Image (cartoon, grey):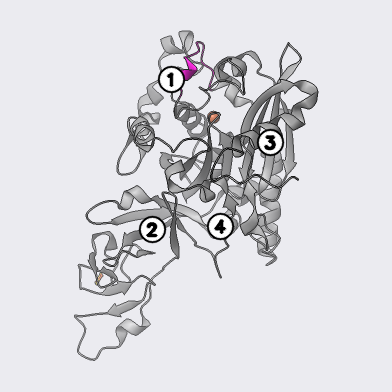
Amino acid sequence: MISQELNDRITRVEDGTGAGAVLRLYWQPAALSEELDTARPVVPVRLMGEDLVLFRDNSGELGLIGRHCPHRGADLCYGRREDGGLRCPFHGWHFDRTGQCVETPGEPDGSRLAENIRTTAYPVVEKNGIVWAYMGPGEPPAFPDLDCFRAPESHVFAFKGLWECNWLQAMEVGIDPVHASFLHRFLQDEDPAESYGKQFRDKAGQTDMPMTQLLREYPRPEIRVEETEYGLRLIALRHMEDGRSHVRVTNQVFPEAICIPISNEMTITQWHVPIDDTHCYWYSMFTSFGNPVNKSLMREQRLKEHRLPDYAPLKNRRNNYGYDPDEQARETYTGMGLDINVHDQWAVESMGAIQDRTKEHLGKTDVAIIRYRRMLRAAIDKVEAGDLDTLPLRGPGAEAVQGPVSIDAIGPTERWDDLWREADAQRRAPCDWAAPLAAE
Ligand code: FES
Ligand SMILES: [Fe+2]
């Protein structure tokens, strides 16, 4: 349990203090590149409680500026793409990519009004299927050399989905290794050969056992959490009856991403980006260490569950997430279908728009959540003290941070700490883009 005051401090992003000030010091996913693959690439973006418009101008450059025209507030999403910027259709004021007003064509001849008009504008860059924005003060930080950024575009697939809740509870489900044994439990196992692009459907480590069976049969993992240069490493050990253990390595990447294995070939790095205090998008980068990603299949799988243009899930609280008590009795733990994203979405949305942490009771298995909140609080304190260089992934050397290792492995229990490192090294060795990681 924490106080209301602390809960506000670590969850709210709109007032520019607390968590919001920390998140603004990092590149944030603002849109998928595919959203701009249209004849008129201009899309509304709401990020950290601010309404913005993202566009590709007529020379192909990206711009991200305030959505409402500084003249009298009309919506620039309907703007004309002209001359390296956007022109408001109401009275023709023209804004360049830096947010500077460069023309007020209805004002009297010789007017210098435009010179003094500037709207919000944020730097944007495109990387592996995602358009990233920097909304903080000063120079943006370098991107770390994580696998999802280092991999060539052919090996990364990006997608997103809307969750109607605060970003922190969304992120916290990703650093909670126990829930996979319950929330995502399948009472029957599917053939792992049918698993492409789906979480927890591959074989466990280097065995023939489906992950679903392992998670179901060993629901009490031993959880270890270590602080790292990028955030937290979580190691969940499931000790099996035969003297072997399953080791699952997942990560919290500061400030609001997780990095987890999805199959033996692929990892997901997933950001939980605040739209505002009570809504967020997950942005996932699926990164393959093997073959190029089958993007059309992965997109098709996900488009069956989401509607465009806002990537809102078709199953949601308005239709009870498709809840079916018969299915719950026979097939799945939730009764909400086989898509594990829906399970997570139900878990985090059903807490309420912002989870009331004054009423929670954390257990021993919530250790990573406790450690993460401690890191976030320390970061908030540092930002308030103006000490930005010692924030995770912000200071000198951040651009050299690699990995993180996200993998499942199985082997003799006493060798658990070697097993996952060996499995990762084996996966990287034949991969033409994933450099072996420096030994720690
Ligand atoms: S409101 Fe945009 S030009 Fe007048
Ligand atoms: Fe989950």
Disc 3 vs disc 1: which is toward the camera?
1
**The C terminus lies in quadrant:** top right
Secondary structure found at label 1: helix
Secondary structure found at label 4: loop
Secondary structure found at label 3: strand
Residue under label 4, please give it.
143
Indicate which disc residue 194 carries: 1
Q: Residue at x 33, y 34 (%)?
A: 303
Q: CA distance from mark 4 to mark 3?
A: 22 Å
Q: Is residue 362 visible?
A: no
Indicate which disc residue 186 carries: none
Per the picture, the main secondary structure of the magenta-coloured stretch is: loop
Q: Residue at x 40, y 54 (%)?
A: 46
Does residue 55 lie above or below 111 as drawn?
above
Crowding around mark 4 (Cα neighbors within 10 Å: few <14, some 14 to 19, many 20+) is some
Q: CA distance from mark 2 to mark 3?
A: 35 Å
Indicate which disc residue 234 carries: 3
Looking at the image, is mark 3 or mark 1 earlier in the sequence?
1
Give the amino acid type for the residue marked by disc 4 in the picture.
Phe
Q: Is residue 237 left or right of residue 335?
A: right
Does residue 239 lie above or below 416 as drawn?
above
Q: CA distance from mark 1 to mark 4?
A: 35 Å
Residue 143 on the magenta segment: no
Q: CA distance from mark 1 to mark 2?
A: 41 Å
Q: Is residue 404 left or right of residue 126?
A: right
Image location (x, y in percent) of residue 426: 64, 34
Looking at the image, is mark 4 or mark 3 earlier in the sequence?
4
Give the amino acid type for the residue marked by disc 3 in the picture.
Leu
Residue under label 2, please give it.
51
Looking at the image, is mark 1 or mark 2 earlier in the sequence?
2
Disc 1 vs disc 2: which is toward the camera?
1
